[in-house]
Amino acid sequence: MASVIGFFKRFNAAFLNPPTPASTDSSGTPLRFGILGAARIAPPALITPAKSHTDVEVCAVAARDLQRAEKFAKKYGIKKWYGGKNGYQELLDDPDIDAIYNPLPNGLHYEWTMKALAAGKHVLLEKPSSDTAEETRRMFEFANEKGLVLLEAFHYRFHPAIQRVKEIIDSGELGPVKEINASLCFPKGLISDDDIRMDYEIGGGAMMDCGCYPLSCVRYLANDNPTAVVSASAIEFHKDARIDTATSANLLQLLNCDFSVPPRLGFIPRWPDLSVRAVCENGSVELFNFPMPVIYHSITVSLNGGKTRTEKALKGEEWWTTYRYQLEAFVDKLRGRTPQTWMTFEDSVANMEWIEKIYEKSGLGSRPQSSFQLPVSD
């Protein structure tokens, strides 16, 4: 009963009514965020976490349609909105905005992140960072040149759950790692045929969307990049064979991603597969629900010989989501403090390199590179 009550308390605080702490510095100006696009991910990824951070204010949103921007802004208590043909650029030109959250479709990440950096804004960029590793490299090099913070938003990395799994592996308790398997698969019906994730021209595909998570996860836990894509296979979208609705890859580690896992017996929906498991010489460790552990997660450590234990990793503010931990780290970085963990430039580039290699091995090829070129300054 206590665990059920705890779940509802965490869920309420994390997603519905986050506590609003008393300000610790009434003289300081909070970091002011603008959002590019009235995206569905923006409320859980930034707007709700910002409510419990005294040093963050979401001040503006821009959308292609002015009415949509206004509706979104009023719904979430955002003071300013921009829309129409020049709406995105008007947001970037707003002198009252310090940082941009970019949740636009993958194929627009490069153009609008480069424009945001050119405008002198820090950027919290949704993953995957771009359509190609070269685009990702250029963005981070430009951010470094401008003295700005750019973070690819692999939010799961900031939560104590995945960090505890890595701690168990790195401790040597289970011996050397033999293989790591990670999956992020959803039941058929959650992603419609007209979803932007099914649009090749703007970087669609399962490997780009849910596949970037397990790839990042196996690389993180292995403390290294793969050495080769041994094999990769994709299920092609029936309306566009360039799009994968599912991809499986063997990198000497195994990963699976799927938009449309079919129901059992033709009608019983399957539970999402959100797991990562490291098999070591002396046992294994498995984390269920690595993308959103605040809702529920379990860490199962199994030693050779039959001894098993189960752990949870809810530290400090137990209701903090992965996004809230991520926001804390982003703000710390901007304020000159050392974040508790970070997603580095090299890590982001490597993840895109291996996404491209998996697509190449599967026969589908990389997503189209952006045609945008940053104007040369005088």
Image (cartoon, rainbow, N blue to C red):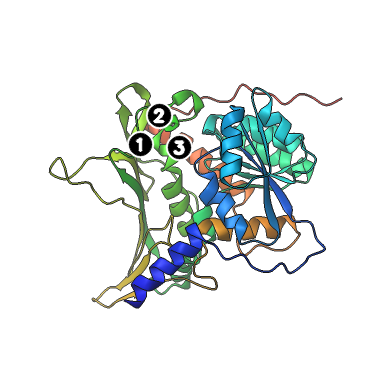
Question: Would residue 58 be found to the left or right of residue 178 on screen?
Answer: right
Residue 361, quarter of the rendered image: top left
Q: Which mark is residue 7?
A: none
Indicate the position of residue 80 as horizontal and vertical percent values: 69, 40
Residue 26, quarter of the rendered image: bottom right
Q: Badge 1 is on which residue?
A: 191
Cβ atoms under marks 1 and 2 closer than 8 Å: yes
Q: What residue appears at the point 53 percent right and 33 percent down from the top-left corner? A: 106
Single out the residue that lies furthest toward the left: 265
137 and 86: which is toward the camera: 86
Indicate the position of residue 163 as horizontal and vertical percent values: 49, 65
Question: Would residue 22 be found to the left or right of residue 74 on screen?
Answer: right
- Give the Cα separation between the discs numbered 3 and 1: 14 Å
Q: What amino acid does circle 1 point to?
A: Ile
Q: Is residue 83 above or below residue 22?
A: above
Single out the residue that lies furthest toward the right: 378
Q: In terms of secondary structure, where does tag 3 sit?
A: helix
96 and 301: which is toward the camera: 96
Q: Badge 2 is on which residue?
A: 198
Q: In terms of secondary structure, where does tag 2 sit?
A: helix
Q: Which mark is residue 208?
A: 3
- Give the Cα separation between the discs numbered 1 and 2: 9 Å
Crowd rating for badge 2 (residues with CA inside 10 Å; few <14, some 14–19, many 20+): many
Q: Is residue 349 above or below residue 373?
A: below
Q: What residue appears at the point 22 percent right and 40 percent down from the top-left corner? A: 262
Q: Is residue 313 above or below residue 34?
A: below
Q: What residue appears at the point 71 percent right and 36 percent down from the top-left corner? A: 116
